[in-house]
Image: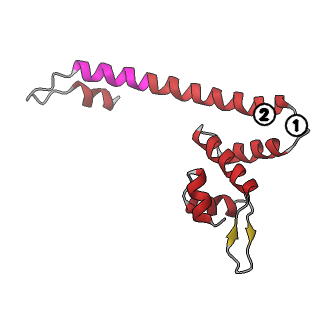
Amino acid sequence: MNIKDVGNRVGLPAKTIRYYEDIGLITPDRAANGYRDFSEAHVHKLTFLARARSLGFSVDDCRDLLALWEDQDRASADVRAIAKDHLAQIETKIAGLQDMAATLSDLVRDCAGDGRPDCPILKGLEG
């Protein structure tokens, strides 16, 4: 299967698939004419990568998860540790976004939004 077909099946642009090849996450076969030739195994691997990336895993995490996925002797604790660490990072980001939203909400609430030059939002951004 060519790169366009596999991209359509897994929902990834060809550029992303080529990038994953460049960084060694996937190694497609080559046809006699030198074109990439993707098998069902490649489709499964790319689907796995697309799902992991959609959950926000970094490329390095994806590399580790892919290695564990391919290792039938893996310990689920190793997989859980990666996912648990990523979840903690997400929760930290969420807390930061909630803090930003609360601060911005206060600033917007305090601003009259009228024709006067006095603006609590700008004062709040000053520090």
Q: Secondary structure at mark 2?
A: helix
Which residues are the magenta region? Answer: 99-110
Image quadrant where residue 88 sits: top right
Residue 126: x, y in percent?
Answer: 31, 31
Look at 66% across and 65% down and name the residue there.
Answer: 1
Spatial CA span between label 2 and label 1: 8 Å
Look at 88% across and 40% down and name the residue there.
Answer: 72
Mark 2 lies on residue: 79
Image quadrant where residue 16 sits: bottom right
Q: Is residue 123 left or right of residue 37?
A: left
Q: Quadrant of the C terminus?
A: top left
- Of the residues shown, which amino acid type is indicated by label 2? Val
Query: Which of the two labelled residues, at mark 2 and mark 1, occupies the earlier sequence position?
Result: 1
Residue 8: x, y in percent?
Answer: 56, 56
Q: Measured along the vertical axis of the image, is residue 22 above or below residue 46? A: below
Mark 1 lies on residue: 74
